[in-house]
Amino acid sequence: MCRAMRYLILLLALGCATTSSVKGTTPMKLTSTPKASSLLAGTAANFTATCDETLTGAKAKVAELKALPPGSDAKVIALYDEVVTAMSNMGARSGLAKEVHPDEKFREACEKCEQQLEAFNVELSLDRGLYDALSKVETKSLDPVGAFWLFKTLREFRRSGVDRDEATRNQVKALSEELVKIGQNFGRNIRDDVRSVKLDPRELEGLPADWLAAHAPGPDGKVTVTTNTPDYLPVMIYAKSGKAREALWTAYRMRAFPQNVEVLKSLLTKRHELATLLGYKTWAAYITETKMVKSAEAANEFIERGRNATLSRAQADMAMLLERKKKDFPGATSVDPWEHQYFEDRVKQESYGLDSQALRTYFEYGNVKKGVMDITSTLFGIRYVKVTDNQVWHPDVETFDIFEGEQLLGRIHLDMHPREGKYKHAAAFGLTVGRLGKELPEATLVCNFPKEGELMQHSEVETYFHEFGHLLHEIFAGRQPYAGVSGIRTEWDFVEVPSMLLQEWPLDPGALKTFAKHHKTNEPIPDTLVAQLKRAKEFGVGADTRRQFFLSAVSLAFHDRAPGFDSTVVLKEVQEKFLPFRREWMEGTHFELGFGHLDGYSAIYYTYQWSTVIAKDLLTQFKAKGMLNSEVATQYRKKVLEPGGSQEAGALVADFLGRPYSFEAFQAWLDAK
């Protein structure tokens, strides 16, 4: 998934602890550093044994909890939190390893473990005895965080069908377990289907010299270009050959075809069956109920508001692209999707003075990595210490401990470069859920960027900052007393806010000057180039944002109706409503089959734009006092990040802003010329 926190939907009442949470088996002492990665460095057999031990231990704790006499509130809460933590941690490690581990057998062991965990999670969510024990806990015996946690926990039990008759609960259990397997198949088919095209070297005219040097022709004289991001993105931006770009664009949109045709149908059908069984009209109605948006109708209204807000700006963007295309093709009447990035780059260079190839020379991967850490260190008063004696799953992985003064806050891992069998996009994965006085948080960033010494696109730099925002949220919020409200366990349509906000920093001149150095001369990026970048970035905002609302509408439309429809037809219908001026959909391609967010995010891809609206409002506070102002950053950390899911997200934002968030800053950004 591109720029996304990887969440799997857990249809269980485990205190709202989502899969991207953390996973560990035995609680660590707070004095020790997190070492969950060592499990992923071992054997598949050891991983399976650990998974089995986790399940056995969790089952024993549940049995102990249910046998407690009345009045044992503190013990009930403590035991249940241990179960949530153990299951969440083991699940997170399974979820990460199945996406990144180089050994296929290990990945298979992780998928099997995940299925076992999910089956037990569903069993727990339908355990009436467990629900009754938690329901009897006196709220007055809890502090506000505990009371909020208990409220969310009991709500999730009811949403899972715990209060239904036995026949219904059995149906819920069967459907939920089936959905886990279907979702795994959907994601695996995307991950494993790396397409490629063979191109004549002449068709790659326009590509940067460093890219060409890394892609030598094979024995047949052709250059093999894959659908992996480091290959795909530069070709779409720089290749002068429209034929080459079209071939790669088409290959990208054929990933997981035909494998996911029936898988997607099953995914949508089973979700609908489960939602209606639980009393909801559609899956969209079910999944939005506990989000900030509250309902599918409200989500649709938000998407429509975004469609209207972006119309004029998007039309202006596309008109400029068409005018530029006419210089090369005088009779052109439209811009094809494989031409969009290419002509956008030409407009930025010719109309705004931005040479994106010259810009790349200031974004060597190592400098960008250092820049992300230096800037966040300045903002939040933390420091990163590289760890060299830990065990990880691949030699590419780097590990850092995060300190505030001498206090260890948590640990992060960076798995940043593409390889066979690895997750193909960019996402942050939890590894260990932090709990006050018990465990330190641990998280992993998974990307597919160029390697040390190689150059990045500015858009990739933005992605780096974006995903790093998720890591910091997990670490800073990892000091809550319960796993279910620790880290990024907020409303799901809020989880992208910290990442959407942090990706603003590589557009700030002051921030850029701290790390954007020429890869050969080490000279800082010139002020003129920064100014050109700022101006050029304003172009395309309308079309790009409207496309995000288009994807949001596709996600919702697939889940806000009864199954049995042709997904390609619905995709085309939504396309015509949102992007009538660009052929995103094309006969014979199957974009939706490779749309990985349909697995994890299901109906709620709108999350990204919902979070952007809030992030743009939060940004006003930084712009008022300076993007590197640590005082504002500290308030943001304390009031928004550190509480995690211990309060409603809207209340956290209002506390920081001094008022409820609004659409105004987002609209002003869209309207800026």
Image (cartoon, rainbow, N blue to C red):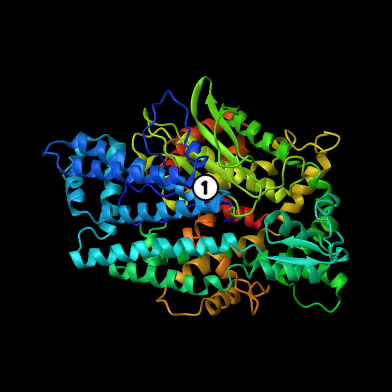
Give the side of residue 387 with respect to residue 211, left or right.
left
Q: Is 193 drawn above or below residue 398 in the view shown? A: below
Q: Tell me where residue 216 appears, x and y as whole percent.
A: 83, 56
| Image quadrant assignment for residue 162 | bottom left
**Is 363 placed above or below 174 here?**
above
Number of numbered discs on residues: 1
The spot of residue 505 in percent (x, y) is: 65, 41
Residue, x 77% and y 78% (percent of image)? 333
Q: Which residue is mark 1?
A: 497
Q: Is residue 550 visible?
A: no
Kind of element beneath mark 1:
helix
Determine which quarter of the picture holds residue 192: bottom right
Q: Residue furthest left?
A: 70
Badge 1 crowding class, 10 Å Cα cut-off, few under 14, some 14 to 19, many 20 or more, is many
Residue farthest top in this picture: 406
Quarter of the image holding residue 284?
bottom left
213 and 304: which is toward the camera: 213
Looking at the picture, how far across and down is residue 414, in whole percent? 60, 40
Q: What residue is shown at x 50% (from left), y 40% (from top)? A: 42
Q: Residue at x 38, y 39 (%)?
A: 25
Residue 391 point in image, percent of width and height = 54, 34
Residue 672 visible in the shown view: yes
The residue that appears at 58% across and 34% down in the rendered structure is 399
User: Where 321 sits versus 11, above or below?
Assistant: below
Q: Nearer the viewer, residue 373 or 281?
A: 373
Which of the image's four quarters has the N terminus? bottom right
Q: Nearer the viewer, residue 557 or 388?
A: 388
Three-letter amino acid code of the residue under disc 1: Val
* Quadrant of the rendering where the C terminus is positioned: bottom right
